[in-house]
Amino acid sequence: MNTTINKNRNKIAAGIAAFAGVAGIVAASTAPALAQFGRLRDGFDQGRRPMVYPWSHADSRPSVPNGRATGVFIWHDRNTVHVESTDNHWFGDNINGFIEIRGGKFDNVKNEHDKDDTRYHVIGNNRIAFHFSARDGETDGFKFNIHDGNRIIFHIGLNGSRTGRIYYGESMTPAGEDPIVFNLKK
């Protein structure tokens, strides 16, 4: 009987260690986004008034040919939001940042392309920190569902810096600034 108990304890301990290892990898890979969250959130809340775009303008998937453009693309179909990137460099780009919904919540966060390097960390039920990369014609990203809310805010960095290569909706409208704020009611 003691042997069975010890085997079960070992299995439980191995399971806990594996979970801790995965949690550590996700936390380490989203650490830059979490640090960026603190810095950008402070700047956003202390008087910077970004442009607020109607969410209806981000409707429908853009037709971005893989490897033909470098940038981050945001769109939605109903309550599913997509954040993807494509790149035309062999060395690739790293995309990180965070997304916040005000007055609502996220759920069902999933990798869009089954790549191993897409990482995200859900904070509460209204923030997501993320990191992914696209290289040499690849596309990478993730998607999630939103419920309720009045604003969704995207803070997105490319290779550790703010970027102007963020586009939204089917028409691939360039977002003029970071953070990008959408009014979910329009």
Image (cartoon, rainbow, N blue to C red):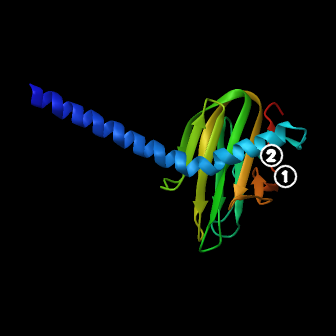
Left or right for 104, reference 90? right
Inspect this view and state whether residue 112 appears. Answer: no
Query: At 64% from the left edge and 69% from the top edge, which residue is drawn?
Result: 67
Pointer 1 with pointer 2, Cβ within 8 A: yes
Element on which disc 1 rests? loop
Dividing the image into 4 quarters, which one contains the C terminus? top right
For residue 39, above or below residue 66 = above
Residue at the image position 86 percent from the left and 54 percent from the top: 176
Q: Quadrant of residue 15?
A: top left
Q: Nearer the viewer, residue 130 or 34?
A: 34
- Read off the residue under disc 2: 180
Residue displayed at 24% across by 36% down: 11
For the residue marked with disc 1, what is the amino acid? Glu
The location of residue 171, given as percent across then percent down, is 79, 54
Looking at the image, residue 51 sits to the left or right of residue 103; the answer is right
Residue nearest the viewer, comparing 30 with 130: 30
Instruction: Using the rendered image of the protein, determine whether residue 21 is visible from the camera's viewpoint.
Output: yes
Residue at image mark 1: 177
Q: Which of the two residues, 65 or 98, is positioned nearer the viewer here?
A: 98
How many marks overall?
2
Inter-mark Cα distance, 1 to 2: 6 Å
Near mark 1 (Cα within 10 A), the count class, few <14, some 14-19 or many ≥20, is some
Residue 155: x and y in percent read 74, 47
Counting from the top left corner in percent of width and height, residue 74 is at 71, 49
Tag 2: amino acid: Ile
Q: Quadrant of residue 70?
A: bottom right
